[in-house]
Image (cartoon, grey):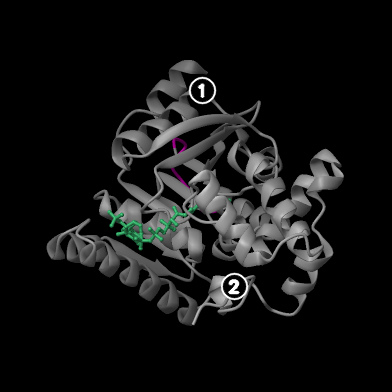
Amino acid sequence: SSSRDAATDAGRITRVGVVGAGQMGSGIAEVCARAHVDVLVWEPTRELTTIGRSRILQSLDRGVSSGKITEREREQAALRLRFTTDLGDFCDRQLVIEAVVEDEAAKSAVFRQLDEVITDPGAVLATNTSAIPVSALGGCTARPERVLGMHFFNPVPVLPLVELVSTPETGTAVRDRAEAFAEQVLGKQVVHSADHAGAVVNALLVPYLLSAIRMAASGHATAEDIDRAMVLGCAHPMGPLALADHVGLDTVKLIAEAMHAEFGEPLYSPPPLLVSMVESGRLGRKTGQGFHSYP
Ligand code: CAA
């Protein structure tokens, strides 16, 4: 009921859980910690929590070296970050943001578990998915009205946008609470989207990235010239192939597949060059090799 919503959605969110400390999860955890929020981060093994922690600390260092935060702010942020390999530890979280691999089975398993362990009826369960139906993840829980998409952009500490993706079941109060957190606590700016693969940004961006990959594959222009053209001719901060490398070619492929599954549009189908690069482990910046090389 709306009066129950009003009670459960009152109060400031101070305890956040982030599931996954990869490229996106680590960035999300970092901005939460920088915003004075207590953050608990999950990875499946101790080794992966260690890697996640060092990824966040490295980015905080970069924040210090570029003058975005002070040494003291870095230390304080680091103290607000804790790590676990047990999702059961998320029982007291008021907001959980899931950022595991872009795979529906993996994300569904996380949502089923979160639904079991989280005790607060007012908790908000969010997914950072780019293209998997948020309603399907809500359907893995007994509280689909508490589930929505909170989609961040890489690098999370730098890019100001959060897309909020509501399903027909997402409660208005839940959406408002997530919006207040993104804007007032994290200092981000919000746009709203219906629950379609790619929300707003990726629905427009991914076909462009795939078109650039087809252009390179066909010999229309070199990778270097495609990127230089869009940087110099359109003032984009990076060209489409460098951006695909930055996002991760495996992730670009998974998003394209999910968009293709929803829309059936041939343009969204991953081009053979993308598929073969992913199969051979050339995933972009994170592996040192993609359309460009990263020493
Ligand atoms: N913490 C704090 N600040 C950081 C930072 C960090 N971890 N990393 C970079 N910065 C800051 C730098 O200090 C710098 O600040 P100033 O300009 O004030 O000096 C600024 O960010 C730019 O960084 P650099 O100068 O090191 O590098 P750059 O100018 O080449 O920019 C970039 C790098 C920010 C990545 C820029 O190229 C860019 O914005 N590219 C486009 C990225 C993009 O489109 N991302 C969205 C991808 S889609 C997505 O993420 C969603 C999805 O689902 C796939």
User: For mark 2, does the 10 Å Cα neighbourhood hold few (<14), some (14 to 19), or many (20 or more) residues?
Assistant: some
Q: Relative to 108, is 122 on the left or the right?
A: left
Secondary structure under tag 1 reads: helix
Instruction: Measuring from the top left, give residue 44's x and y in whole percent.
Output: 54, 72
Quick check: can you spot residue 291? Answer: yes
Q: Quadrant of residue 106?
A: bottom right
State ligand 1's quadrant. bottom left
Amino acid type assigned to the residue bearing label 2 in the image: His
Q: Residue at x 53, y 29 (%)?
A: 192
| Residue 178 visible (yes or no) | no
SS assignment for the magenta stretch, majority: loop
Residue with the mark numbered 2: 292
Q: Secondary structure at mark 2?
A: loop
* For the residues bearing labels 2 and 1, Cβ distance under 8 angstroms: no
- Give the spatial CA distance, label 2 vs label 1: 44 Å
Which residue in the structure is indicated by mark 1?
Answer: 172
- Of residue 64 and residue 222, the one placed in the foreground of this image is 222
Residue 52 at x, y percent in the picture: 43, 72
* Nearer-the-camera pick, 264 or 185: 264
* Numbered range of the magenta stretch: 117-122
Relative to residue 89, is residue 212 drawn left or right? Answer: right
Magenta span includes 118: yes
Instruction: Please tell me how crowded label 1 is: few (under 14), some (14-19), or many (20+) other residues with Cα within 10 Å.
Output: some
Question: Sequence order check: which comes first, mark 2 or mark 1?
Answer: 1
Nearer to us of marks 2 and 1 is 2
* Image point (79%, 65%), residue name: 219
Residue type, label 1 = Thr
Is 36 on the left-hand or right-hand side of 111?
A: left
Relative to 34, say whether 293 is above or below: below
Q: Residue at x 24, y 50 (%)?
A: 36
Q: Position of residue 107 (x, y in %)?
A: 64, 55
